[in-house]
C-alpha cells in the first residue's frame, strides 16, 4: 500500500470523532495521496468506508498499525 | 387564551415496544380476574384458566396459519427465537451441526448461534447487500452444504425495515431438506407472513400485546429437542407457569391487529415515505437506509453524518420525541449495530423511527419540523458545520 502522506491518530476517540477528524484533514494531502486514520473505536471500521462513499473519496483498505491498532487508508480523489 | 407548555410527547419507537392495543387492555383486565389460577390443575378456577389459554392458543394459531398444537407461549420473542434455534439444532444433531443465518438477524438469533458454536457446532452468516437484504444465491448455497441442520432468516429487518427473501430461501431450504426458522417479530400483525417455514418466533409487545409474551411455532413433523431442563408445560417446550392473562391479551390484540392490518399498513406506509423523502431534503448529509419499496410499512432509518447518535436521541427526547438508534454510543457494548455494519452504511448519528396505530400525520410532521434544527444545533456545537 502507498505510504500515507498524513497519519491521523484517533486512538481513544469515539465515533463520529475519527470521521470528523478525517473530514477536517483530508484537504491537507494532495489529490491522489493517502490519509491513514488510526482508530480503535470499532465503529470506524464501518464509518470510514461509508464516509468515503458519501464524499466520493476512495477507501483504500484496513491494515494494522504498531500496537495492533487498526489503520484505515483513504485516498483523496478530489 | 393560548396554551404554553411542552407539546404532547410523540412516541416513535414501536419497533422496540408498541403501546398496548385497547383490545389487549380489555382482555388483560378480564383475564386477570378470570385466568389467574394454574391451568394445569383440576378445579374450577384452573379449568377457567385452561379454557382461556386454549382459546388464546387457537386464536394465535389461526392468525399465524398454524395448528394450535404447534403453538407455544414463551416469556419473550427473544426466548422464542432461542428455543427455535437451539431446539431445532438439538433435534437435528444427527443430520449435522451447521447453522446458517443472515448477518442481520436480531441479536437473540446471533447469540443462540454463538452458544451453538461455543458448544462445538458451526455457524455461517450469509452477507447482505447495501439495502440490508440477504443474498438469496449465497443463502441457497450455504444451506445446500452438507451437514446443515437449520437455517434462520427474519421476515424483515427490525433495524432498517428491509423485507427478506423468505419465499426464495424457504424454497432453497426445502430443496436441501433443511428446516427454516423465521423470526417474524417485526411482521406479525403488520404484514402478511411468509410461507414455507418450519419454525416461527414472534413477540406480542411488538404488535400491541403486553410485554412478556413470545410465540414459538414448531410445525408438526419438525425435529425439535428442548435445550432446557425437562418441564411439562407448553408441550415440554417452555418451562414454567404460563402468564395466562398476558397470553389472552396477546391473542386478542393479534386478532384485532389482523383485522386492521391492511388499513393500518396503507395509512402508515405514506407517512414512512414522507419521512424517507423529506429528511434528505431538509437535513444535509443524511443517508436514509434500507429498501425504499420492499419493506416494513411502519419503520424508517437514517444516519446523520458527523452527529453523535446518543446526543441526537437525547436532543430529540428533550423535544418530546422518542426514537431509537443503532449507533455504537447508544449500545451498552459501544459497538455499532451489526446490521448497519453488515450493510456497510454509516453507523453514527443513526435514528430509527417506527410508527404505530396511535401515530398521526401531525406527529410525523412535527418530528420532521423539529429534526433539521436539532441536527443543525448538534453540528454547530461540535463545530462540524460545512465539513
Image (tube, grey):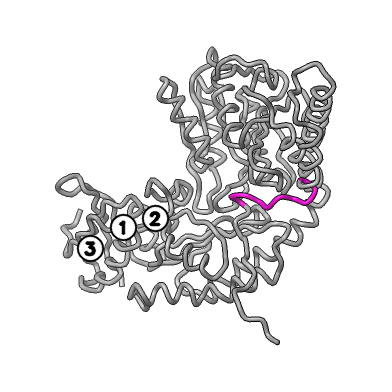
- Say if the magenta span includes residue B233: no
Residue B293 relative to residue A17: left or right: right
Q: State the SS at label 1.
A: loop
**Residue ID at (58%, 50%):** B16
- Residue B324 placed where, x, y %? 52, 56
Are the residues under badges 3 and 2 in a single subunit? no
Q: Quadrant of residue B40?
A: top right
| Residue count near mark 3 (Cα–Cα under 10 Å), binned few <14, some 14–19, many ≥20 | many
Residue identifier under label 2: B329
Residue identifier under label 3: A35
| Residue count near mark 2 (Cα–Cα under 10 Å), binned few <14, some 14–19, many ≥20 | many
Are the residues under badges 1 and 2 in a single subunit? no
- Which disc number belongs to residue B96? none
Q: Nearer the viewer, residue B81 or B182?
A: B81
Residue identifier under label 1: A14
Are circles 3 and 2 on residues that touch, CB within 8 Å?
no
Q: State the SS at label 3.
A: strand
Give the Cα separation between the discs numbered 1 and 2. Answer: 8 Å
- What is the magenta range? B15-24
Q: State the SS at label 2.
A: helix
Chain name for mark 2:
B
**Residue ID at (17%, 64%):** A6
Amino acid at each position: 500500500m502507498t505510504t500515507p502522506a498524513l497519519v491521523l491518530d484517533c486512538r481513544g476517540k469515539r465515533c463520529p470523532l475519527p470521521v470528523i477528524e478525517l473530514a477536517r484533514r483530508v484537504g491537507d494531502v494532495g489529490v491522489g495521496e493517502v490519509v491513514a486514520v488510526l482508530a480503535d473505536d470499532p465503529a470506524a471500521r464501518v464509518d470510514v468506508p461509508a464516509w468515503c462513499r458519501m464524499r466520493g473519496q476512495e477507501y483504500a483498505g484496513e491494515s494494522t498499525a504498531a500496537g495492533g491498532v487498526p489503520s484505515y487508508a483513504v485516498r483523496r480523489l478530489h | 387564551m393560548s396554551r404554553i407548555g411542552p407539546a404532547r410527547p410523540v412516541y416513535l419507537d414501536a419497533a422496540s415496544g408498541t403501546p398496548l392495543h385497547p383490545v389487549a387492555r380489555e382482555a388483560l383486565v378480564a383475564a386477570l380476574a378470570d385466568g389467574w389460577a394454574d391451568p394445569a390443575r383440576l378445579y374450577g378456577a384452573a379449568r377457567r384458566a385452561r379454557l382461556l389459554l386454549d382459546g388464546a392458543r387457537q386464536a394465535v394459531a389461526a392468525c399465524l396459519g398454524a395448528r394450535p398444537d404447534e403453538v407455544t407461549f414463551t416469556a419473550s420473542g427473544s426466548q422464542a427465537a432461542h428455543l427455535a434455534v437451539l431446539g431445532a439444532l438439538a433435534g437435528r444433531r444427527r443430520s449435522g451441526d451447521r447453522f446458517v443465518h443472515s448477518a442481520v438477524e436480531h441479536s437473540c438469533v446471533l447469540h443462540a448461534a454463538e452458544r451453538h458454536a461455543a458448544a462445538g457446532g458451526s455457524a455461517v452468516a450469509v452477507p447482505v447487500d447495501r439495502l440490508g437484504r440477504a443474498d438469496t444465491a449465497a443463502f441457497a448455497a450455504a444451506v445446500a452444504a452438507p451437514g446443515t441442520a437449520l437455517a434462520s432468516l427474519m421476515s424483515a429487518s427490525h433495524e432498517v425495515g428491509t423485507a427478506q427473501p423468505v419465499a426464495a430461501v424457504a424454497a432453497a431450504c426445502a430443496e436441501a431438506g433443511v428446516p427454516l426458522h423465521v423470526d417474524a417479530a417485526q411482521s406479525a400483525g403488520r404484514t402478511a407472513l411468509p410461507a414455507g417455514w418450519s419454525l416461527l418466533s414472534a413477540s406480542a409487545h411488538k404488535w400491541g400485546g403486553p410485554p412478556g409474551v413470545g410465540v414459538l411455532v414448531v410445525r408438526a413433523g419438525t425435529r425439535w429437542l428442548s435445550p432446557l431442563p425437562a418441564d411439562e408445560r407448553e408441550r415440554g417446550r417452555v418451562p414454567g407457569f404460563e402468564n395466562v392473562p398476558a397470553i389472552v391479551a396477546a391473542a386478542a390484540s393479534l386478532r384485532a391487529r389482523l383485522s386492521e392490518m391492511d388499513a393500518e399498513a396503507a395509512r402508515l406506509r405514506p407517512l414512512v415515505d414522507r419521512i424517507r423523502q423529506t429528511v434528505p431534503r431538509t437535513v444535509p448529509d443524511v443517508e436514509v437506509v434500507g429498501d425504499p419499496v420492499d419493506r416494513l410499512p411502519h419503520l424508517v432509518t437514517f444516519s446523520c453524518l458527523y452527529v453523535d447518535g446518543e446526543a441526537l436521541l437525547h436532543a430529540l427526547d428533550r423535544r418530546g420525541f422518542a426514537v431509537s438508534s443503532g449507533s455504537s454510543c447508544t449500545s451498552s457494548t459501544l459497538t455499532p449495530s451489526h446490521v448497519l455494519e453488515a450493510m456497510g452504511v454509516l453507523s453514527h448519528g443513526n435514528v430509527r423511527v417506527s410508527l404505530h396505530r396511535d401515530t398521526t400525520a401531525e406527529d410525523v410532521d412535527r418530528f420532521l419540523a423539529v429534526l433539521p434544527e436539532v441536527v443543525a444545533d448538534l453540528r454547530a456545537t461540535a463545530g462540524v458545520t460545512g465539513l
